[in-house]
Amino acid sequence: MTSPDKPITILIAALGGDGGGVLCDWIVEAAHHAGLPAQATQIPGVAQRTGATTYYVEVLPVPHTRLGERAPVLALNPAMGEVDVLLASELVEAGRMIFNGWVTPDRTTLISSSHRVFAIGERMAMGDGRFDVGRLLRAVKERSKAQILFDMDQAAEEAGSVLNAVLLGAFAGCGRAPIPDQAFEAAIRGAGKSVDANLAGFAFGRAHARGELEQTVRAHQKRLTEARGVEDLIEQARQLFPVATHDIVEEGVRRLTGYQDRTYAALYLDRLDKVWSAEKDAGGDGALLRETARHLAVRMSFEDVIRVAQVKTGADRFARVRAEVRAKDGEPLVITEHFKPGIEEMCALLPPGLARRVLAWAERTGRLGKWYWSMHVRTTTVSGFFRLWLLSKLRWWRPRTWRYVEEQAQIERWLDAIRRAAPLGRELAREIAECARLVKGYGDTHKRGSDNFARIETAVIAPALAGAMAPSVAADAIASARVAALADPEGDSLAKTLVEIAHRTQEVPRAAE
Amino acid sequence: MFDQPPAAARTNPERSFTDEVRSLRLGDGEIFRGEGVLAVTKALLQSGVAYVGGYQGAPMSHLVDVLVESQDLLDELGVHLETCTSEASAAALLGASINYPLRGCVTWKSIVGTNVAADALSNLASPGVVGGALIVVGEDYGEGASIIQERSHAFALKSSVWLMDPRPNLPTIVHCVEKGFELSEASNTPVMIELRIRACHVSGEFVAKNNVAPAISRNARLAEPIPQDYARISHPPSTYLQEKLKVDVRLPAAQRFIVEQGLNELLPGEREDLGIIVQGGIANVTLRGLDRLGLGDAFGAVKVPTLVLNVTYPLVPDQIADFCKGKRAVLVVEEGAPDYLEQEIGALLRKRDIGARLHGKDVLPMAGEYTAEVVTEGLLKFFAQTANDIDLSKPMQALETARAGRAEAQRLIGAPLPLRPPGFCTGCPERPVFSAIKLLEREVGKVHISADIGCHAFATLAPFNLGNTILGYGMSLAAAAGVAPVLQKRTISVMGDGGFWHNGLLSGVSSAMFNRGDRVLVVMQNGYTSATGAQFLPSSAGNRRDGENTSDIATTLRAMGVRWLRTIRTYNVSTMLATLREAVTTKEQGLKVIIADGECQLARQRRIRPQLAAALKRGERVIRTRYGIDDAVCTGDHSCIRLSGCPSLTIKPSPDPLRDDPIASVVNSCVGCGLCGEVADAAVLCPSFYKAEIVQNPSRWDRALTRVRTAVIGWLQGKESVAHAR
């Protein structure tokens, strides 16, 4: 426990280059204004380039005037179990401090921004590599004495200040700082940079820490497709399918109407109906249908050039881009799209017979995957927009294209596998449905995804449907193969996993002998 | 207007050290407030230093950086500042103090800088000095360090250079600098002062003194050089005598001075039967450890007598012996391996037949940083073995509770937290080169990459994971010499312009030319030594005195006889890829050099931001460029991130209600370097990327054009929504 002649210890966890040094300086300056001995130190080095780093500050809550000649020996390193306040500018960095044992329930007030700055490993994952913060938030509650947790990134943006000003404010308002508010404000003024904005950020942080105000959290919004004239189809779906699937199916119907037309949306419902029959027969409650409906809508709205043109010329797109790039009202915006279609993308628009001949020629002559047309289209100009707009109008032609025919055949094969798997085991069927997430993107990404899907189909799904593998074993195998397929773009993990699966299935009969 | 200037015209970004420069002018009785490095700088000026030099590197960069900005003050005092191109030239600078009564100081990052300086250091230490010669090394050791973990102590021992390790508070640091000069002069020996990372950046205050203008200086030149004194040349037969002088004369002189001046601190305590000997640099963590055990207080009073060694070489045998005499046990708290102090103290106790039991690395770890936890545990073990009358149950309990708490926290969190290694800044010009190398590897397979010191070393980390070895600063080309002959594919060595001028040109290029090495070298020409804080280079604006460019990399290489030489703008990934492909596959033998040219983005932003702000304020038309991703087009594969890793290119939840994978997203810190678009193009990724140019302070023409475009496009879009309702 802290006694009057022991320093208050403050550990700061931050991302390098984000101004943690300024935060330290403010605290030291504020302590100086309050006449208190203080010392800060840091370990900038290479971490300054976006890496995780820490700063450490000690403030003795006894003014110089009462110390006389005595000077405290202040530490340069934090000590486990002796941190009074943790200031973290990002949630996982707060977590790192908890993980390393600096935060203790008998002593530490944890002050952290709740927002996330994703680490490179989370960002580069092929699917969803985000760290699950659920357990971390529990650790925050259980491992610290008190918590002040809110989105300081948002607060700073709203105040026009840097995040650290909000963090400083939260420290000032947390009840553990031995320094009066005016001293903090004097420190911000003394630094002389963006004083008003930083004082505003400081005031918000302090008020939030004291519970004097609430933050209106910006919730993440899913964007539902708007398409009119399909209410009858939606009504039909409501009659046909269990309630738990309605939101998904509805979105699917609207999306496919916008993507193609209502006939296509009706085809979607037909396909789902067959899956639902199979699931019902197997005693299912709609869980399989829901997953299939989700993936089927995505697969049926595959990303061909027509769809890209549709999105890029959509009515609400420019407003969306303006908001994203923070263009102010009255500031003209020029948008340049980066396209680089290859032979395959071009063939996607041709009728199947012609497309296959061109592709065969391209493959024979080594031009496939080599020839691309780099196009930079300015969609904010009339001519640029018009070209894309024309392309988006090719929707009527889509069902006659090679890509469409190919996609429908693959979709049918996938749906067929799901339907056949349902009586064997609903879990198996769901795992097969889930495999659709592998197929996404454009060019190489799409090809890799389709190839991975095909490999899993050959190695696991087909044997399972043929009865060569127990359904529960197959379901597990598919799940692990899917994870492996998303582990690395080179496909090494998937190859290894499929070999292991093959071994296991071969071992079973031998073990039984 | 804000295009990239040629390398020669890149000037030092406008880093401002105004406050620091002001504090260097403080006079008698005024209170200096600032960090450790700056205190050292002020102490130099107070000591009448005549020349200062150094090579940048964390944690010491600021010393020279601040002096560069203090040219007026240096001119007034007559202090010469040399911004050296390597630590070897910095060490050689101290040669001025061999013959002349000039006080000089050089600085660098250690251990690496000391390694580079070693030859000159030996040749300096042997003849010794008449003017105080100080070497301030930033000991880049422990958490936050970026280099191999070794001790500078070894260099002090082998060359007979005295080593000071001051307690990490400003008054002691300043005192040690001032006394360091005196010690150097009293013993005719160079003195090294080591400051650990945290000590370099520790904040604090001390009472300043007036700066002292050196008696002999740029402003007060000597008419004649001193006559030759062969004894002061490190050449035989002088060297034999010099070796004897080191041990017979200089060492005793130094030991006398240390005792007379009380450089080491003896903290008395009531437990006379025990003692602790600690390096000054880790005194704080040790004293706080004693406080934690109930054997001290927050003001450094201790119950166990403690000898704080602000000078760790040489030790003063009598001082150590006097301290240990009559004690049952003594603990040496000495950070790093090997345990030089403990060995020497052990031998001393044995020779003098002093019975105190010696502890050190038996209760403390041999290697690694001495953090609070490590030292506390060591102290607990020491007292548990030597003093069973001290009740350690409470601190023992506290340590165990804290450790159990940490284990519990880790169990609660479950999975390991995502690592956050350092990486390239937003818009870094070096990133595109590695994007291109990754694309090259897709075509030709894996290539042996010889990496180097500098920001580009981040390419060895995710998402690039490119690089097989690092052999030191500017060593990447030389480090591939033995690998290249046994590989079918050519090796690629990557080097920065900093490394090129520091060592790469001679150790690498000339050796590769001489041996007809058939290798590829990529030189990152960003115009500064960026990793250390954007200092000048021979190929940037030349030097701080004028805007003239000194040396040009391409011209230098041509003069060395390099025939295959290309200079490529880094952001052009397709061209970079084609050039790399050619370099790796061409039939032409010999060294192939690609100069990857692109200004350091940090420097560029510092330079152009104020210009842009001013232009905006004047109402001028300014285009802001940044990139974006269509969230309805991106499907969340993140190939683009795997080829870039730009901090501004991150992920966010998909707005699509049917997809869960997060999608890529460009955040507002984007500086519009164009890499996203280039990579999407070169790697044929996806059509999600767009370039947005926002016209600020638009002209009337801009506005009119926009009105027309919006009207026509709006009309077409209107038709679209009708189509939907069909």
Image (cartoon, coloured by chain):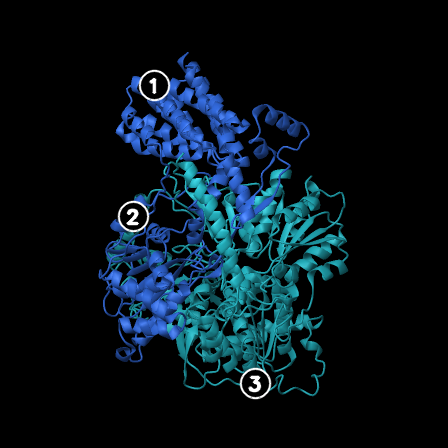
Q: Chain of mark 3?
A: B
Element at label 3: helix
Mark 3: which amino acid? Answer: Glu
Q: Which residue is mark 1?
A: A278
Q: Quadrant of the N terminus of chain B?
A: bottom right
Q: As rendered, which of B219 and A369 lies closer to the eye?
A: A369
Q: Are marks 2 and 1 on the same chain?
A: yes
Q: CA distance from mark 3 to mark 1?
A: 92 Å
Q: Chain of mark 1?
A: A
**Residue A137: assigned label:** 2
Residue B660's image quarter? top left
Element at label 1: helix
Mark 1: which amino acid? Answer: Ala
Mark 2: which amino acid? Answer: Leu
Q: Which residue is mark 3?
A: B76
Whether residue A376 is visible to the viewer of this picture, yes or no, is yes
